Structures are given as C-alpha cells and as structure tokens.
C-alpha cells in the first residue's frame, strides 16, 4: 500500500467511499436507524438523538479531512529525513480542550432534555399498573383513576392478563398523559415500546414509573427487552392508542364483564379487540 502510486491510492479511496455510500442508500429510510416517535417524550428523545448524531458526524468529518490532508500534504517524496520538531503548546491545548468542550456541551444538552422528560409526570395522568411475569404481562386499570365519561364514580379494578400464546393488549387514550407503574413478580423484565423511544426495567420489590402522552392512534408493537428466561421471546404485547370515547367504551364493557361481583377477574389478551 505504501508503494502504491498516489493516483491509484486516490482512486481506491474514492471507490471505497462510493461503495460505502451505495451501501447506506440500500438500507432505506432514516427511520430504520431511529424509529419515529408517537409521544411528546419521544420527540424530545429524537431531538437528542439527532443533536448527538450531527455532532458526531461533524467531528468525524473534521478528523477525516485532517487525516486526508496530512496524508497528501506530508506524504513521503524521497528518502530524506523531514525536519523534526517537538512540543506545540497551542496544538496540544486545542487537542485536549476542544474534545472536553464537546463532551461538556453534549452532557449539558442531554441532561436538559432528560430532565424535561422526567418533569412531564402529571398528577392528573391516567395510571396503568403494569406487572411483568414469566412470560407475559398484566395491565390493571383502577376505575377511580381513569376519569371515564361513562361512570366517574365507578370503583374497582379491571385487568388484561396475557399468556405466552396470547399477547395482551394495553389500551390508552390519545392526547392524554398516561403514567405506567412497573412491577415484576419474579425476575427483571423490561417494558419496551419501540414507538415510545423509551424503555424501563421492571425490578422485583421495586416500582418504577414513567409518563408519556401519545399523539397518534393505532396499534404499536411492544415487548420485553431484558432476557428473562426460556420463553423471553414470547413476552410480546400491543399498545393500542385510541380516542377517548373509544377508550371509555372499552372500559365500560370490561368493567361490566369483569366486576359483576366486585372482584377482579382476569381477561385474556384477545378481549377488548
């Protein structure tokens, strides 16, 4: 490689870059790298992703350009030993100071955005108790916390309980804050909804929580993102975001079916479809 003529090396470099760009084009849209988010919190995370990505690309471009310049400008042209020099306080200070400033800047921006996400928890948020177990999920709704238009004085709890062979469905209203209280009955699980751009662990003996406000209706795939045993791959569920009227109708139907005797009754994941 060192004995290769400069023109040939440049052609090889251009060919390599071209091949890399063609490979990137073949991967499809940018959503394959960063899924689009459907919540306010996801939009903040998406902003942070692109800030860090752009900063990384700028640094990569500058370092790459400097390397290419140095290889061309200071390439060996004869066997004479080039002038030697030692030291260079300004260069060394810049090489240390600039990376430190970049890291401090990215850290500050990250903390500001993460604090904004954590501050979005609201007292009036609808609460859903999420319990993970080997190898499925339970989603419990306390009627006192739902604020439904069907019966604001309703009492009791309704629940959706899945099985490894029957993925449960988590219902939530659109354009309203929803707080998830995460618990585990056995081992560590992880609540992950790709379109939330967020995941949080369920730890035995501890309750973790987060709040999101979904801005799009539809069905969104979700799963456990922590290896939790033999059938971990079967711990899937669906988040169904619906209009408030449809959510109230689902709650009313489930409450009438489950709470005839005032006790919590399990419902499989197919109920409420």
Image (tube, rainbow, N blue to C red):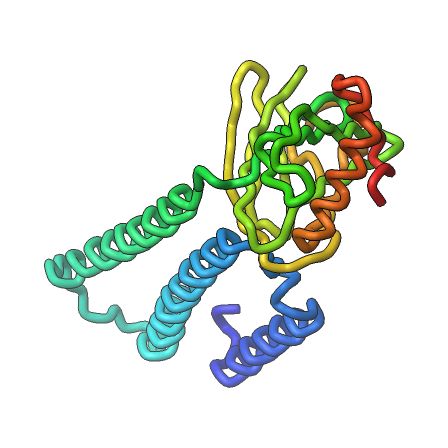
Query: In terms of image quadrants, where is residue 65?
Result: bottom left
Task: Please report the residue visible at 32 percent of the width from the left and 50 percent of the height from the top.
Answer: 112
Front-most of 75 and 96?
A: 96
Task: Give the vertical position of 62 relative to 118 (above or below).
Answer: below
Q: Is residue 87 toward the left or the right of residue 253 in the image?
A: left
Q: Is residue 76 visible?
A: no
Q: Is residue 227 toward the left or the right of residue 94 in the image?
A: right
Front-most of 151 and 237?
A: 151
Task: Please report the residue visible at 51 percent of the width from the left and 32 percent of the height from the top.
Answer: 209
Front-most of 116 and 84?
A: 116
Instruction: Report the label total.
Output: 0
In the rendered image, the residue lying farthest to the bottom is 7
Q: In the rendering, at what x and y percent does residue 127 appear?
A: 57, 35
Task: Please report the residue visible at 76 percent of the width from the left and 43 percent of the height from the top.
Answer: 250
Q: In the rendering, at what x and y percent does residue 206 appear?
A: 52, 19
Task: Give the vertical position of 25 relative to 184 (above or below).
Answer: below
Tell me the quarter of the image containing the C terminus: top right
Q: Is residue 133 visible?
A: yes
Task: Please report the residue visible at 50 percent of the width from the left and 55 percent of the height from the top.
Answer: 40
Q: In the rendering, at what x and y percent does residue 50 appear?
A: 46, 62
Task: Give the vertical position of 205 relative to 178 (above or below).
Answer: above
Q: Is residue 244 toward the left or the right of residue 211 in the image?
A: right
Q: In the rendering, at what x and y percent does residue 203 appear?
A: 57, 21
């Amino acid at each position: 490689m060192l004995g290769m003529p400069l023109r040939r090396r440049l052609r090889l470099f251009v060919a390599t870059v071209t091949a890399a760009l063609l490979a990137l084009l073949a991967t499809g849209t940018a959503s394959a790298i960063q899924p689009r988010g459907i919540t306010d919190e996801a939009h903040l995370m998406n902003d942070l992703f692109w800030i860090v990505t752009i900063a990384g690309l700028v640094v990569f471009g500058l370092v790459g350009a400097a390397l290419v310049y140095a290889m061309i400008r200071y390439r060996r042209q004869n066997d004479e030993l080039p002038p030697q020099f030692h030291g260079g306080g300004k260069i060394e200070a810049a090489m240390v100071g600039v990376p430190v400033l970049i890291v401090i800047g990215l850290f500050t921006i990250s903390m500001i955005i993460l604090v904004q996400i954590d501050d979005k928890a609201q007292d009036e948020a609808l609460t859903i108790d999420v319990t993970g177990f080997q190898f499925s999920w339970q989603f419990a709704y306390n009627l006192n916390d739902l604020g439904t238009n069907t019966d604001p004085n309703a009492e009791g709890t309704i629940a959706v309980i899945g099985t490894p062979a029957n993925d449960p469905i988590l219902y939530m209203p659109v354009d309203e804050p929803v707080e998830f209280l995460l618990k585990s009955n056995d081992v560590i699980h992880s609540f992950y909804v790709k379109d939330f751009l967020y995941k949080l662990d369920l730890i035995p003996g501890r309750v973790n929580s987060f709040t999101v406000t979904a801005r799009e209706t539809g069905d969104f795939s979700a799963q456990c993102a922590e290896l939790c045993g033999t059938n971990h791959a079967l711990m899937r569920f669906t988040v169904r975001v619906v209009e408030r009227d449809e959510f109230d109708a689902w709650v009313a139907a489930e409450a009438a079916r489950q709470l005839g005797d005032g006790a919590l009754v399990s419902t499989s994941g197919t109920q409420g479809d």
